[in-house]
Image: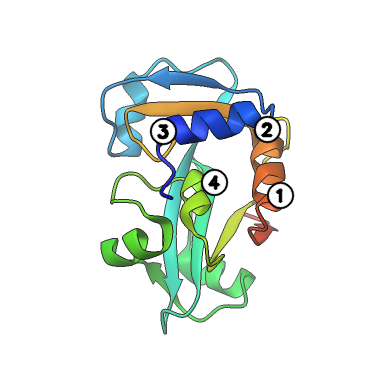
Amino acid sequence: MIFGKNDIYDLLNAKNIPFTCTEHRPVYSMEEFDVLDIPANAVICKNLFLRNSNGKQHFLLTVPAATPVDLKELAVKLASSRLSFASAERLEKYLGLQSGLVSPFGLLNDTSKSVIFVSSKNLPPSAIIGIHPNDNTATVWLTFGDLLALLSELKVEVKLIEM
């Protein structure tokens, strides 16, 4: 099963995870978020789908949009070989997503648990984050702690690092 927007809403409701949702025109880049109605104190996150040099490890990095990402430094922190952006084909294969739709909710589609979720230790569990529900016409707002709990329950490997 590929989790779409409504499937994600249903899952969050079934797990009693509080969330709100903002429907909007399709958003393909971080710059386009500037025109959206963002809840007060919310953190918009950027999501990068990465692979190591031999393509045997894959990472989904989710960090606040303003956080600079140095792939060389990140590789060292993850004890990985050189990192680069994964191809659209790999994104489809591992997360069931297309370019422009990268989201931690894509990990729901990773039935083989091949992708490691990576985020910042500096993002508090109480932070309200905004992420796509595998669809760039909506943003789901939930706490970072609730996202981590959901990923843990789904047996997704999570690494929190200094960013």
- Of mark 4 and mark 3, the one earlier in the sequence is 3
Whole-number angstrom distance, CA of label 1 to CA of label 4: 21 Å
In this view, 132 is above or below 108? above
Q: Is residue 25 left or right of residue 158?
A: left
Q: Secondary structure at mark 2?
A: loop
Whole-number angstrom distance, CA of label 3 to CA of label 1: 20 Å
Determine the residue positioned at 68% across, 45% down: 148
Residue 137 falls in image quadrant: top left
In this view, 100 is above or below 162? above
- Marking on residue 153: 1
Name the amino acid type tagged 3: Lys
Label 2–label 4 contact, CB within 8 A: no
In this view, 81 is above or below 100? below
Q: Position of residue 51 (x, y in %)?
A: 43, 71
- Of mark 1 and mark 2, the one earlier in the sequence is 2
Report the quarter where the C terminus lies. bottom right
Q: Secondary structure at mark 3?
A: helix
- Marking on residue 5: 3
- Of mark 3 and mark 1, the one earlier in the sequence is 3
- Of mark 1 and mark 4, the one earlier in the sequence is 4
Q: Label 4, on which residue?
A: 63
Name the amino acid type tagged 1: Glu
Q: Which of these two is toward me, 82 or 150?
A: 150
Q: Label 2, on which residue?
A: 15
- Of mark 3 and mark 2, the one earlier in the sequence is 3
Whole-number angstrom distance, CA of label 2 to CA of label 4: 24 Å
Is label 4 or label 3 in front? 3
Whole-number angstrom distance, CA of label 4 to CA of label 3: 21 Å
Q: Secondary structure at mark 4?
A: strand
Circle 4 Cα neighbour tier, 10 Å, few/some/many (<14 / 14–19 / ≥20): many
